[in-house]
Amino acid sequence: MIHMRQPFHSIATAAVFLVFGVLFGGAAISQSGVTFADVTLNEQATWAATGLMFVMSYFSLVHLRYRD
């Protein structure tokens, strides 16, 4: 069962993850990579981070609940 949560905290968290996903995606498209503390992620790792941010954005709004 999918249960929707709509409090402000969940929506704000999803928006932050969405912004990071768009930024990582833009960096992956431009093939410049993302740099964290003198370590530059290559294009494949940047695409993986983009996907992870979008998945985290989705699951910050929706979570699965098991009912008997």
Image (tube, rainbow, N blue to C red):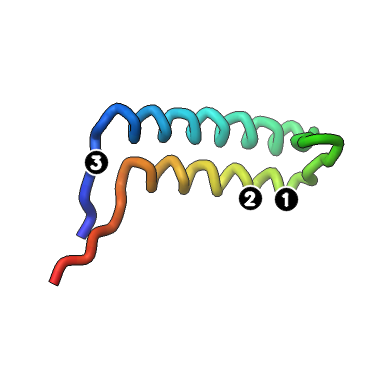
Q: How many marks?
A: 3
> Residue 63 appears at what percent x and percent y?
30, 52
> Which residue position is annotated with label 2?
48
Determine the image quadrant of residue 9: top left
Q: Is residue 32 left or right of residue 50?
A: right
- Inter-mark Cα distance, 2 to 3: 26 Å
> Which residue position is annotated with label 1?
44
> Residue 28 appears at what percent x and percent y?
70, 38
Instruction: Give the residue type at disc 2.
Output: Ala
Instruction: Give the residue type at disc 3.
Output: Arg
Quadrant of the image for the C terminus? bottom left
Secondary structure state at the residue bearing disc 3 = loop
> Residue 2 appears at what percent x and percent y?
23, 55
Q: Is residue 12 above or below residue 60?
A: above
Q: Residue furthest left?
A: 68
> Residue 41 appears at what percent x and percent y?
78, 44
- Inter-mark Cα distance, 1 to 3: 32 Å
Secondary structure state at the residue bearing disc 2 = helix
> Which residue position is annotated with label 3?
5
Secondary structure state at the residue bearing disc 1 = helix
Instruction: Give the residue type at disc 1.
Output: Gln
Quick check: marks 1 and 2 in contact, CB under 8 Å? Answer: yes
